[in-house]
Amino acid sequence: MADVTPRPLRTAEVIAVGSELLGATRVDTNSLFLAERLGSIGIELRAKAVVGDNRGDLAALFRQASERADVVILTGGLGPTDDDLTRDVVADVLGRPLEEDAEIVARLRQRFASRGLRMPEVNRRQAQVPRGATVLANPNGTAPGLLIEQNGRLIVLLPGPPREVQPMFESLITAWLEPRTGRERLHYLRVFVTGRTESHVEEAIQPIYSPWRTADPPVETTILAAPGQIELHFTTRSSDGAAARAMLDKVRDAIVAALGEDVFSVDGRPMEVVVGEMLQAAGLTIAAAESCTGGLTLSRLTDVPGSSAYVRGGIVAYSNDVKASALDVPPHLIASHGAVSEPVAAAMAAGVRGRLGADVGIGITGIAGPDGGSAQKPVGTVALALDGPGGYARARTVWLPGGRSQVKMLASQAALDMVRRALMQDAAVRRR
Amino acid sequence: MADVTPRPLRTAEVIAVGSELLGATRVDTNSLFLAERLGSIGIELRAKAVVGDNRGDLAALFRQASERADVVILTGGLGPTDDDLTRDVVADVLGRPLEEDAEIVARLRQRFASRGLRMPEVNRRQAQVPRGATVLANPNGTAPGLLIEQNGRLIVLLPGPPREVQPMFESLITAWLEPRTGRERLHYLRVFVTGRTESHVEEAIQPIYSPWRTADPPVETTILAAPGQIELHFTTRSSDGAAARAMLDKVRDAIVAALGEDVFSVDGRPMEVVVGEMLQAAGLTIAAAESCTGGLTLSRLTDVPGSSAYVRGGIVAYSNDVKASALDVPPHLIASHGAVSEPVAAAMAAGVRGRLGADVGIGITGIAGPDGGSAQKPVGTVALALDGPGGYARARTVWLPGGRSQVKMLASQAALDMVRRALMQDAAVRRR
């Protein structure tokens, strides 16, 4: 074990090696797993890269990463074939000769023999080890991992397949990383907002988060526009978990005070979970009548484990005569107001509530596009309604941007948000 | 337009900017789209990177990429807020001052005004342009794109959201990239298979694709296990489009001959599009009764533009009494067979077909988990049924792996595949 230094490991970069990962259909799932596990022990993933099986490109990326990060993790390119370059390139950049490891050769031969096979000679490449490296056993494949300490940094070479990477990385964390991360951890706060644009959220909260950026420890802020919600991500690094939590709680309270009911989640729960928990707390059941959203709202509500306790079901009425026959929408309403209108949405909400015996009914009717829009009701026009106990009712119309699937997503979000606001604001809807 | 050189554009690198993209839950989908579109005009994506909102890291990555690649594409970090650094960093590395573009400011003000809003002052940041850059209009958002030519290379700055990136990149290809590429193009074939495991597909097709690997030009093969389908991706690079197409057609025909009806798509169309087109061709309408899938099957069917021509609608019956009251499932069937059983699925299919007046009804009832499983019917048990014209009926039970959302996805895939196989195999179901 050469030159161990007491410097704590704080930052990491990941390089995924393999031309196939640059295609149009491949996602590097390893880096998602690595990001989460690194974050959990307080190591920040600063950058990740994907590079093809090209010696020059890989050498350049690796050299730069190893000058920046405390931990550099390379995945892939450890196979037995000519285009598996990771071992060679890393040894070269670090100036360490490759040497054959007799124990790895023996283990490889045994692995093949146990399946009644002779080891192909090409597999000897997998026994090449940069001088001074520690070999990491791979219970699920032929390519062993390698760990190299150099100038207080850790260089980790892992195979490509996720089922080989994951168990190897877990033992690496226990044996090598966590003992050297120091006591600092990353602490997170996620606040989700709906009903405002990104820039209006930014304008409202900029005076709040700005001072925290220079606090001790500083709180970093990221604002992200996701479909149907603005996400605020706050991160701080501290060895005092209670103090960090208290700080993030203050940030959270200030944000909620500034944005009010537009904040729907302060702990990362998505809208369908928030609404589900509110329904369950109020002892209410729900049913949905959907036209343009085509079942998406119900599908999101039922993504939540345990949702059968409060979801009665729903009716997807894609054609006007189904709206009449399955939801009791009076045909004269459609004739006089059009299928996309608040009166029709309200009749759908009342119809599904009655038909399925739910406490709360919602109705969604709109134009998801790309066809079907008009000058008066362009694509993206969606009428939403809620029908509740004791004659409680709400309706609104929204104009949503984007293509067909985005309109569906945003309409279902607006419908769920309507339920949320009704449950927050009106005791009436909570009284069965 | 400075220093245009005749050098053809052959290589590209993509840098996605945004700390949120380094988290454990975010995937950079833009780079998949960019890889495919670049490949289609013969530009090879050599590397891609994701970097947080950190000035130093972004500058280092951008500087290196711009020394290697003919085209460097940066996505994200063009928003109006303090942590949107891409414009600043690129201007800095290229040594070009930032200047406010009056036309962009005017367009931004107009965009806000058209929605009855005042432009927040922070949005002026989005009008900052490195000297000499070409502004790329963004029809779907506030952040314009930027294009800079420097030393014969193209530097492209695009916003983050995919629906903003895609139209901008399409016009960029037409106006700037394609005229400057050589004659070689990448050609793709995608074949989707269902009903077999990845290793069984691999075993069946390995003798087919192996010889093509050493053909001239070679055809590269990638096998990818996606939820509910095995995807086969074949790629070849050639300046002779007709010859490449003919070669890929031969590969396609051999794969279809080997895998038969398990191949459901040879052109990238997803299952819901394939089934929709078959229904439309047969002049049939469909309705779905869903329990465990909670509306997902209908939502997928209605993701397809024009699906209102053949989708009547559906009923999500999450509780047993809704199965009886809204779908006419006889309560004694549930009592004797259980809610998750082929007789109940068949009654649901017949019920929704009758209630909504569709030609084909499907019924899906199962246990999505995490709770509700038993020794006899574990989590993942799903009964599927189809009810068609003239007494035509089918039912089957499947046992699906994975968590709640994967079981939902796989069950909806199996239900749609049941419709597909029925329409392929049985003239009866096509005769109304």
Image (tube, coloured by chain):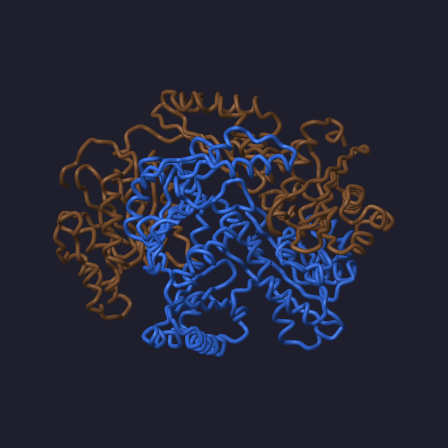
Chain colours: A brown, B blue
Q: Judge by depth and name the residue closer to the eye, B149 or B17.
A: B149
**Relative vertical location of residue B39 with respect to residue B78 in this rendering, above or below:** below
Where residue A166 sits in the image (x, y, percent)? 35, 49
Where residue B115 sits in the image (x, y, percent)? 64, 36
Q: Residue at x 32, y 44 (%)?
A: B62
Q: Quadrant of the C terminus of chain B?
A: bottom right
Asked whether residue B314 is in view, the answer is yes
**Relative vertical location of residue A253 with respect to residue B233 in this rendering, above or below:** above
Asked whether residue B335 is in view, the answer is no
Q: Residue at x 39, y 28 (%)?
A: A236
Left or right: where B426 falls relative to B331: left
Left or right: where B86 falls relative to B348: left
Where residue A355 sits in the image (x, y, percent)? 79, 47
Q: Judge by depth and name the residue closer to the eye, B271 or A400.
A: A400
Please, which residue is most extreme toward the right here? A332
Where residue B34 sits in the image (x, y, percent)? 44, 55
